[in-house]
Image (spheres, rainbow, N blue to C red):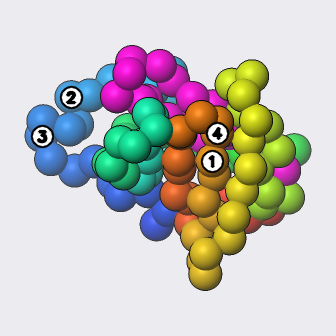
Amino acid sequence: MRRFIIALALLSTPAAAQVPTVSGTDGQNSLGTVPCAAVEGQPIESCPAELRHKDDGTTTLAVQLKTGEVRRIYFEGGEATASSSTSKMTTETRGDMLVIFIAPGEVYEIPKAAVAAQ
């Protein structure tokens, strides 16, 4: 299985290394950060994230928001298909980035290569 760890900025500082995973891991997941905003009007910041590629070709991105929530975004064939939110989700491609919007104000920037079909 091919993994794209370049998609997430690796947590390499001692302080960051002590941060628990977003929602538990078996050591096979990519841990790092993704640019995100949890509230409308909030600036984009780095949010802790965990990227899980599954054998069936799907991918789940779990993002720890500044609000304390964990947002899960689900991908199939490199496309965002759903999230753990009941709010409307839309996507936009900007070059090699996939920008995900979840109403009313959540924003996530994900490199397309990170969620591409494996």
Of the residues shown, which amino acid type is indicated by label 2? Gln
Rendering quarter of residue 2: bottom right
- The residue that mark 3 highlights is 14
- Which x, y percent locates residue 76? 84, 50
Place of residue 82 in the rendered image (x, y in percent of width and height, measured from the top left)? 79, 37
Asked if the magenta segment contains residue 66, the reply would be: yes
- Numbered disc 2: secondary structure: loop
Instruction: Give the magenta part as a residue range.
Output: 60-76
Is 40 magenta? The answer is: no
The residue positioned 59% from the left and 34% from the top of the image is: 104
In this rendering, position of residue 52 left or right of residue 5:
right
Q: How far apart are marks 4 and 3 (CA)?
A: 32 Å
Label 2 Cα crowd, 10 Å radius (few <14 / some 14-19 / many 20+): few
| Element type where label 4 sits in the image | strand
Q: How crowded is mark 3: few (under 14 residues within 10 Å), some or many (20 or more)?
A: few
Of callouts 2 and 4, the N-terminal one: 2
Contact (CB < 8 A) between labels 4 and 1? yes
Where does label 1 land, which residue?
A: 101
| Measured Cα–Cα span from mark 4 to mark 1 | 4 Å
Q: Which of 83 and 30 is in front in this view?
A: 83
